[in-house]
Image: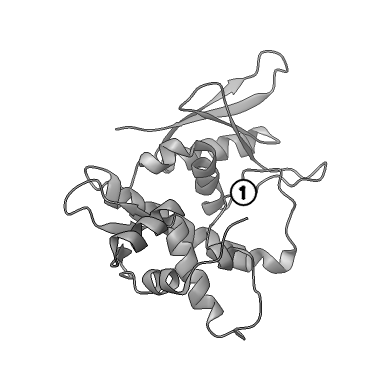
Amino acid sequence: MTRPLTAAQRRLIEAADPGTGRLKGTEAQLTALVKRGLAFRHPRPPHDHFLTPAGHRAREARAQAEPSEPSEPQAPASTGGVFTARVGGEPTPPAAENAARMREVRSAWQGMLELRRMTNPDASTDRPCAWERTHLVQAAALALEAAGHRPAGAAEGEDGYRVRETPQPDAVAVHAPDAPTLRACVETLEASGWQAGEYTEPRTRMRYVLASPRRV
């Protein structure tokens, strides 16, 4: 279970630069945020620390919680601040939570674009960064959900996309209920900096998308 943020960690996240997500704090404090996936250390000098997409999500959750009664335990994500992309197959949340989820997804995607800008050697935001290459399923799912695609639910008959690992170390498979949805997923992933194409599974003859992060 994710541990709640300490008061010092919350202050660091809230004080991050609103534009770049740059953090200021002691080495121990910053290292603790890195270990929790809320910050990363820039590979180039002066090796400053910046919020990750999860860190941006944590800051937004804190800001949204401010007007609320402090004693109310709101959404679990606000305790750990970790955004989780829906890969398909999770329980479908109540319709009343859709608006909040859309805000979370938009915030996470903007954080991802900022992470690309800060970590890609040429500051490019049109192709995946190193974090996405090591979290392929979550990264592809975030790109799809941010573009408005609907993930499949856990119940039988709840159609939508499903992102899954493949035997290939640098590719994921995206399954969808019909050809138009598959084609739309290809277009979204390509626009998000992925190489994507449709293929046929030899045994089942089912069509799917194979996608990998574009490098150039």
The image quadrant of residue 100 is bottom right
Q: Is residue 131 above or below residue 76?
A: above
Q: Is residue 202 left or right of residue 188?
A: right
Task: State the image coordinates of residue 83 (x, y, percent, origin top left).
Answer: 54, 56
Judge left or right: residue 108 versus residue 28: right
- Identity of the residue drawn at 64% across and 68% down: 75
Badge 1 marks a residue whose secondary structure is loop
Residue at the farthest left position = 45
Residue 147: image location, x then y, percent:
52, 51
Give the residue number, with chain letter if any, for mark 1.
Answer: 86
Question: On the rendered structure, is 39 left or right of 169?
Answer: left
> How many C-alpha atoms fall within 10 Å of the one at disc 1: few (<14), some, or many (≥20)?
many
Q: Position of residue 180 (x, y in %)?
A: 63, 37
Nearest the camera: 143 or 182? 143
Residue 89, placed above or below residue 10: above
Q: What is the tally of numbered marks visible in this picture?
A: 1
The structure residue drawn at horizontal position 66% and vertical position 13%, both measured from the top left corner, is: 202
Q: Quadrant of the N terminus?
A: bottom right
Residue positioned 62% across, 86% down in the render: 69
Q: Is residue 144 visible?
A: yes
Q: Quadrant of the C terminus?
A: top left
Foreground pick, 144 / 67: 67
Residue 25 horizontal/vertical position (percent): 30, 67
Q: Is residue 159 left or right of residue 184?
A: right
Q: For residue 128, say whether it is visible.
A: no
What amino acid is labelled 1 in the image?
Arg
